[in-house]
Image: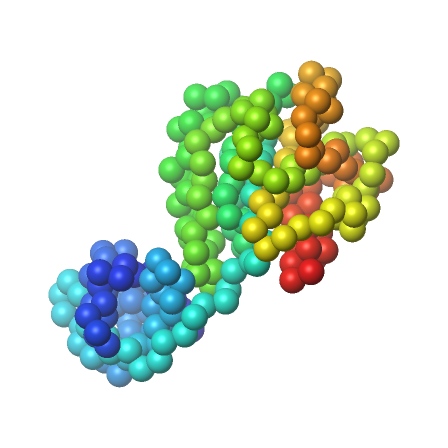
Amino acid sequence: MPHFFISTGDINQDIITVSDKENFHHIARVLRSKVGETLLLVDENRTQYKVVIQNIDSKSITTKVVETLKANHCLDLSLYLVQSVLKTDAQNFVMQKATELGIKKIIPVITDNSVIKPSVADSKIDKWQKIANEAVKQCERVDFPMVEQRTTIEQVLNNQDFDIKIACVERTHTMTLKECLRNIKIKSDTKIAVIIGPEGGFSAREIELLNRHENVYKVSLGKMILRAETAVISALSNVIYELEND
């Protein structure tokens, strides 16, 4: 069943009015929904409302709540992606797939070996957020990941908000990601940042930065050299598999 995001301000007891232009267009024009049909609405508190359409006029849709549910289509983990910005198609792919996997925030960074200029990355933030928002609807998440402003590895490593930072480093002789995940202890509120470099990998300077900071685990994703976008999916999927509901 398609679901649409609303504000609690749209709710009046058991009546919810859908007046957002994009939602209205999709429900009334694209899906061609009719009076009596059922929709699933979600507010900013992740509460789901199963509703029946009562009226459709030229600008809004009036619905009646028939069931209220607490949504569970989200990760228990507080997982963040810190990722060196890639070329357009690859970066768009990362935004979509990271959202589908349940990331809380996506933090684009410019690294020493990045091929994208900072000004170009800055101009893409709104587009990336839109891609993430569209992916939310497809995978039936009930929350939106935030695409943050472009930053640097230095700023990420100095960010005290993250309890654990996992940096994926190619051709490393340190532990594998699996070994790392099976040795760290997490709590329900542990914030984990997964750090992925560019196609050319992290520079020697950046590796030294990673070595100097506490709570940074340098890990290998295996014997193969992966494309950066493949590394994102591999790393996030493995973290979720090992730690979700642990």
Query: On the rendered image, what quadrant is the C terminus found in?
Result: bottom right
Which residue is drawn at the image coordinates 15% and 62% (left, top)? 59
Side (left or right) of 88 relative to 177 = left
Tell me: residue 102, above or below residue 173: below
Give the image location of residue 39, x and y in percent. Answer: 34, 74
Query: On the rendered image, what quadrant is the N terminus found in?
Result: bottom left
Picture quadrant of residue 20: bottom left
Picture quadrant of residue 146: top left
Give the image location of residue 133, x and y in percent. Answer: 41, 51
Which residue is drawn at the image coordinates 46% and 48% (left, top)? 145
Give the image location of residue 244, x and y in percent. Answer: 65, 58
Tell me: residue 17, above or below residue 80: below
Which residue is drawn at the image coordinates 54% and 25% (left, top)? 155
Q: Is residue 61 visible?
A: no
Q: How is the image coloured?
A: rainbow
Side (left or right) of 85 relative to 166 = left
Work out whether residue 192 or residue 135 is closer to the camera in this orientation and state it. Answer: 192
Side (left or right) of 83 relative to 178 = left
